[in-house]
Amino acid sequence: MKNKLTKILVIVLLGYCVIGLINCKKPLIKNRNNQGKDIICFGDSITFGYGVSAKENYPTALAKMVSYPVINVGIDADTSVEALGRLDSDVLSRQPFLVIIEFCGNDFLRKIPIEITEKNIREMTQKIQQSGAMVAIVDISAGMFLKDYRRMFRKIAYEEGAIFVPAVLNGIITNPSMKSDFLHPNGSGYKIVAERVYRAIFSYLN
């Protein structure tokens, strides 16, 4: 009887392991081997580099880690609504290999419904992919802060075949020595953001 129960437990555990492996399978990233030329960082003040000089923002730090030119098209205080309106001129008109999308902070502050943010990020992702480029979606949540956006970004990335860059501000937003104000990183903080972005994208770079 004991041996029979042991076998049943083993079979059940193996079943859970298989299910876990299936659920953890990485999504197929669209346009992985495209012919684009640049990495474009498309975002708000976190991408722009609020609180630091142009030499200390995260796209500048990222440029030192990759072989592609990195273009910063971040705009301070930008929302996903405004960003969608400038997608063609600031992103699609260039030759993107990879576009790194980072928005939601200002949507949250301006009380734009999360459903609208989701619609905008998804539309950006789809349009960029239709142009032939890869997309990475950056999550600026940390712990309970913006956790609903974290789930939303992960969902879009999985469903649309984009790279998900999780929790880039984790450990920064709660550390005064890493910030220039209550929210924005300082030079050291932006370097960590760049390192986290790089870890998420490096295996997809040619």
Image: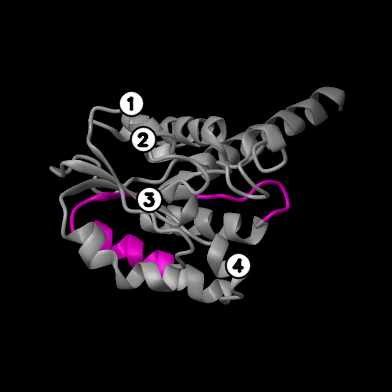
Image vertical order of residue 111 relative to residue 154, above or below:
below
147 displayed left or right of 61: right
Badge 3: how crowded within 10 Å, few (<14), some, or many (20+)?
many
Q: Which badge, 1 or 4, is on the more N-terminal residue?
A: 1
Q: Is residue 132 magenta?
A: yes
Q: Which badge, 3 or 2, is on the more N-terminal residue?
A: 2
Given the image, on which type of amino acid does mark 2 rest? Thr
Q: Which residue is mark 1?
A: 64
How far apart are the two marked residues, 1 and 2, measured between alpha carbons? 7 Å
Q: Nearer the viewer, mark 4 or mark 2?
A: 2
- Kindly check if marks 1 and 2 are in contact, taking CB atoms under 8 A apart as contact: yes
Q: Which residue is mark 4?
A: 108
- Residue lying at the far left of the rendered structure: 35
Q: Is residue 39 magenta?
A: no
Residue 91: numbered disc? none
- Residue lying at the far top of the rendered structure: 3
Per the rendered image, the range of residues in magenta is 120-145
Query: Can residue 130 be spotted in the picture?
Result: no
Residue 162: numbered disc? 3
How far apart are the two marked residues, 1 and 4, measured between alpha carbons? 31 Å
How far apart are the two marked residues, 3 and 1, measured between alpha carbons? 23 Å
Given the image, on which type of amino acid does mark 1 rest? Lys
Q: Which residue is mark 2?
A: 60
How far apart are the two marked residues, 4 and 2, measured between alpha carbons? 26 Å
How far apart are the two marked residues, 3 and 2, measured between alpha carbons? 22 Å
Pinpoint residue 34: horizontal percent, then vertical percent: 17, 43
